[in-house]
Amino acid sequence: MKSPGRFALLSIGVAILLVPAIGAQNPPAGTDQSGKDKTAQAQQPLPKRLTKAQQRKAEKELDNPYKVWLEDEVGYIITDAEKEAFISLTTNEDRESFIEQFWLRRDPTPDTPENEFKEEHYRRIAYANEHFASGVPGWKTDRGRIYIIWGKPDSTDTHPSGGSYNRTPEEGGGETSTYPFEVWNYHYLEGIGPNIDIEFVDVSGSNEYHLATDPEEKDALLYVPGAGLSDLEAQGLADKTQRFTRSDGTHMPTGSYDAPGNTDEFYRYELAAKLFKAPPVHAKEPDELVSSRIIRNQLPFDYNFSYLRITSESVMVPITIELPNREMSFQEKDGVHSAKLNLYMRITTPSGRIVNSFEDVLPKDFPDSLFQQYMTKKSIYGKTIPLRPGLYKIDMVLKDVQSGNVGVVSTRLAVPRFDDEKLDAGTLILADDIQHIAPNQIGIGQFVLGDVKVRPALKQEFASDQKMGIYFQVYNLKVDDKTHKSDVLARFHVTRGDQTMLDATETSAELKQVGNELTIETMVPLASFQPGKYKLEITINDQVAKQTLTRAQEFTVTAPVQQRAAAN
């Protein structure tokens, strides 16, 4: 049986998936790679306008999941400007980000995990498919479209079998026979007006009701001479043939009363155009959306992803989460301060298929004598997941059991495909600790990569009285046909502005190699580095294949730990 905390966490984890969202490596929660708040992206200028022909071509070339989303799922509610912006995007990462913002702009309560608009939209699609299908899915019919855009009508007048019908005086009076038809009434539709009647007619008897623009479309005797006459036609004061010479686009009979205003030709076609137009979007201002995210993310945490090749079709993805200890709620008992965090993660494909999900409990216990010291530090957690190359969405929920505070991140996870032939490399990881482990611990526990334990430094900050760890894997080295060995030069270059702080080279003999792979794992002393920002570049030169690659990472050196402690 699940504990109450675990069950509550699951509920939150499932709920956040209703608010899709998108950053690949260590951006703060709620931001993208550039550090900009994602909720503000919906307010950015749209891309350059495309011609109609360009739009049609771009739409045809969309990957199937995005084409289905655009045409089948949101085709009725996406605005023209949004549609043009979406098909102008060139990468699936940007499309995922757009989809997240599309729903976020319509969320009436962005301070909650649920998105009521999105839930209601998909409920309407399901209802339309269940009630309005007629040889085509219900969402493709006129009734389905109106229902999806505007929701349930306030009242309906249904005639599922048609048959005898007495016209109102405004319609010309008299009795006729009709096809099956329905009249939906909405008390008010935003952007259209009050008391809106919408008539649907099933001329074919196949249950495919179409939106009627002529009040006489339901008249089954319209083209039968001498049948279904109006009052004036029955009295010989009007001729039925006059219906076919009207200039307003209808076939209404001449009546004793003025025709209602909604029979005006321009009104009817304008109404039809408005009914089929995407409903207005009332997006909250950026500051409101940011405030909502702050409320929702009560437990802010940092995170990053690394990528290391396993095979050509499998990538090892170390996920690291870091949280300041001061953000946790502790309870003291018998001289021990204890806190507990529940972590939930879910990884899905762009189409929504779940590829991995898990939960973990993260307890923290500090003795009273060290409690104040540890409150200035951070707790770090690592999880390694194997994934195929491709684009994913990862949802992470961190819950403090004591306080109930929750941190939520929903972002993209772009797992790269490593080249099988050319020189390639995994993520350059800067770590605050690298340790070799016993053979019986290989593959077990957090931060374990092969036979070493690598704990990433998420902020890439290191005190000058500490060492900076470097972990770097290189793939596809070529072997000399004569010596049966590789020949590699690895250059380590550290700069501060224009000043070179370190320039060292190591050869194949000094590096750790297995087959055609090379792994750099070293700790660099920083005692000679003054506080400031630096840049590390590692250049790998495969002298057999005559290929070179370079990876770079910035890092910051701070004052010695003891000096900072004395200052505090």
Image (spheres, rainbow, N blue to C red):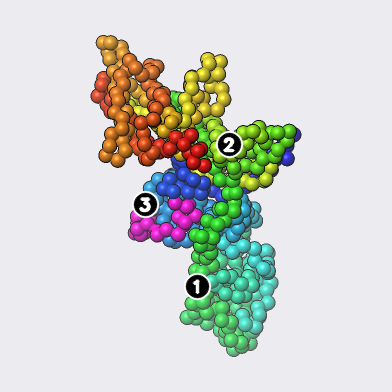
Circle nearer the viewer, 3 or 2: 2
Q: What is the magenta range?
A: 36-58
Q: Which residue is mark 2?
A: 373
Left or right, 191 with respect to 547, comes to right
* Quarter residue 430 falls in: top left
Nearer to the camera, 509 or 162: 509
Q: Note whether 553 is above or below 442 in the view shown.
A: below
User: Which numbered disc, 3 or 2, marks the residue that appears first in the sequence?
Assistant: 3
Residue 517, horizontal then vertical, whole percent: 38, 21
Cα distance between the residues tagged 3 and 2: 62 Å
Q: Amino acid at mark 2?
A: Gln
Visible residue check, residue 554 = no
Residue 16, horizontal then vertical, whole percent: 59, 47
The label number, if any, that marks residue 269 in the structure image: 1
Q: How busy is the neighbourhood of tag 1: few (under 14 within 10 Å), some, or many (20 plus)?
A: some
Q: Which residue is mark 3?
A: 57
Which residue is drawn at the image coordinates 56% and 45% (left, top)? 300
Is there a contact, CB below 8 Å, between mark 1 and mark 3? no
Is there a contact, CB below 8 Å, between mark 3 and mark 2? no
Nearer to the camera, 181 or 35: 35
* Quarter residue 526 falls in: top left
Q: Amino acid at mark 3?
A: Lys
Query: Mark 2: which secondary structure?
Result: helix
Q: How busy is the neighbourhood of tag 2: few (under 14 within 10 Å), some, or many (20 plus)?
A: few
The label number, if any, that marks residue 196 in the structure image: none
Taking the view exactly as shown, the residue that stands out farthest to the front is 566
Cα distance between the residues tagged 1 and 2: 73 Å
Q: Amino acid at mark 1?
A: Tyr
